Image (cartoon, coloured by chain):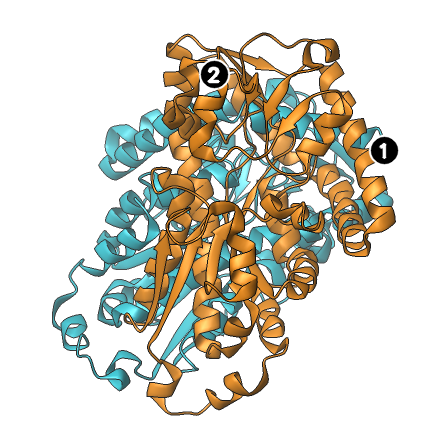
Chain colours: A cyan, B orange
Amino acid sequence: MDRRSFIRRAGTVGAGAAASALASPAVAQEYPKITWKMTSSFPKSLDTIYGGAEDIAAHVSDATNGNFVIQTYEAGEIVPGVQAADAVSAGAVDAAHTCSYYFWQKDPTYAIGTALPFGLNARLTNAWFYQGNGNKLMNEFYATQGILGLPAGNTGAQMGGWFRKEINTLDDLKGLKMRIAGLAGKVIEKIGVAPQQDIPVNGVYDALNKGTVDAAEWVGPYDDLKLGLQKIAKYYYYPGWWEGGAVVHAFFNLEKWNALPKSYQAILGDACAFANTNMLAKYDVKNPQALKDIVQQGVTLRPFSQEIMEACFQAASALYADLSKSNDYFKRIYEDQVAYKKDAYLWMQLSEYTFDTFMMIQQRAGKL
Amino acid sequence: MDRRSFIRRAGTVGAGAAASALASPAVAQEYPKITWKMTSSFPKSLDTIYGGAEDIAAHVSDATNGNFVIQTYEAGEIVPGVQAADAVSAGAVDAAHTCSYYFWQKDPTYAIGTALPFGLNARLTNAWFYQGNGNKLMNEFYATQGILGLPAGNTGAQMGGWFRKEINTLDDLKGLKMRIAGLAGKVIEKIGVAPQQDIPVNGVYDALNKGTVDAAEWVGPYDDLKLGLQKIAKYYYYPGWWEGGAVVHAFFNLEKWNALPKSYQAILGDACAFANTNMLAKYDVKNPQALKDIVQQGVTLRPFSQEIMEACFQAASALYADLSKSNDYFKRIYEDQVAYKKDAYLWMQLSEYTFDTFMMIQQRAGKL
């Protein structure tokens, strides 16, 4: 389904009288003055991920000659980062810019919105959301929470995080305490790691420095460098198999979304689409230099061993089977995504993979 | 530079009196009734690539309550596909949806807008356009042509095309006539292939069937299947090294763009950003099934040999060195893209590549 029909359909979910009343042809009514609050789950200091909310606000303002204003707030300013979904559901704020998987403990279906461990990469995530069933299915679930959600940022495949000692085998991981977000916590629990999920971003450095945790993941080179993690852990692992293409969502209070004029829904939808692409572009331009800086500071880059990757993959598959037994939304959406994933990774093996592989070989040979 | 500041800056290029006059606060003036014509270089039958123009038109209409109408026309309906840039430059149409590289013979700088052989993949193309210098530099060039251009579609890495016989060595390629688009024609000429560039999409099947050409490339499985190429050539090669992430551009007549209200520029900019992401999503959802259909019809998939890839890479590098000697725009924009490419493919080797590789191995093992 394309985005437009998605938005049109979403607009009919309990739209009721408010939207109809606004369907009058009078221009002033079509472009009413509206001011919304959008709370971010991120600090302003992380210009990449916080920037998504700013992009949305700026584009909506530009498109409406300043009539539709979205005020953005950093985490904690009006709502704590981890309460963003509740605040939107309750209508305490109109909107949030957040990662859906922060709320997986309310319902694991939330986790699918951002990324499932061993899920889709960023490009295939977009395909599933925009042209597969992703947006449609996730919004059937979000509607049960009083929320409408649109992808509004992506980090790409994240790094696997910072470790104070080298990790080669499953035994090396056993008993480690690791700061990790989302459903991945349940996965690493199965292989003997103790996940720490209550540490907000501005507490990650201290937790790792003081030894409250032995390892921590955040996003990737550019953001991690800002947190200073390279100063206190010398092994930087990849890939972040739990976030192959993590989505940052714009959440809107469903009733307020439905009450918007159709033109504002269209404008907001496209502003989110822009933010979605632009955030990934920002990461892809800023991460390379940050990676070089990190390596120059003496950090060692290491891939997770095949043993670790395979054990985590099996643990993730077992977890999804468990969750599917008790949660119908999770089961239905997970199965839809897996069906697409099988086809998508078949297709990506041909031109994309061989093109990229050839280019990377030239890059390493210094021939680009 | 982000898209918004890009659009703002683009809006100041020779904006003149028209835009200023429209800056009045009266709502009706801010949302004037405008009807534009957009000519596509593609036939309506290719819903993927023609669909980009339809996405733009639909989103702009929705965002303006139908006040800003963009009428889309397929190739040949009002302007032949290969004359789209000239028609926009001259103001014969307001806009086009086309591949910039179709016009490389006017100036090879046009080729960079779509994709250079051995250039960037789709994701890195977005990064370079939105957050690198891509949009800024290309629009300095497009402005000399009376055009403003925005990415408004991407095909991803294309396939390498259809061959009637197996191609293993450079000798196998010598003397072949191949239908191929863009600057790639100059590259394959250097290794002894005769490029045929005057064959429009609806002539590809006949040319290959009658033996006017020995090989032909178009896009990828979904589009190629529609053309029926699998019926007349049994070898389907990959990757399309000349189009690692081919952009389809929206071209706007620069004066008409500058005369738009700022809100319409913002709306049109975001509609193009949506179309850009949505087209790639459509390909990534439709190509896998089409690929399976093609294989079921008895087609053999083959990667180009390392010998062929390396010879083409060297030929492309030599061509860029030549073009840079005589064309300042080409030189400056090419060098900027290469600088980014070196960094980008360094970064993509870590999490992205190892994540995708692991997932593809699971896909092949039937474990997804």
Instruction: Measuring from the top left, give residue B341's x and y in whole percent.
Output: 74, 43
Q: Of the residues shown, which amino acid type is indicated by label 2?
A: Lys
Decide if residue A245 is on the left or right side of residue B366: right
Q: Can residue A50 be seen here? A: no
What residue is shown with label 2? B210
Image quarter of the C terminus of chain A: top right
Say if mark 2 contacts mark 1, CB within 8 Å. Answer: no
The residue singled out by tag 1 in the image is A366
Q: Is residue B22 above or below residue B164?
A: below
Decide: is B362 above or below B151.
above
Q: What chain letter is assigned to the residue under label 2?
A: B
Q: Is residue A63 above or below residue A190?
A: below
* For residue B8, side relative to residue B29 (left or right): right
Neighbourhood count class around disc 1 (C-alpha, 10 Å): few under 14, some 14–19, many 20 upward: few
Residue B157 in picture, x, y percent from top left? 56, 33
Is residue A45 something one can see in this rendering?
A: yes
Which of these two is toward me, B143 or B83? Answer: B83
Q: Residue at 36%, 55% (x, y): give it.
A: B72
Element under label 2?
Answer: helix
The answer to which of B23 and A117 lies nearer the viewer is: B23
Q: Nearer the viewer, mark 2 or mark 1?
A: 2
Q: Element under label 1?
A: loop
The spot of residue B48 in percent (x, y) is 39, 40
Vertical position of residue A356 compared to residue B331: above or below: above
Circle count = 2
Residues B142 and A289: in front is B142
Q: Place residue B105 in its image quadrant.
A: top right
**Residue A28 percent location from the top left of the image:** 27, 86
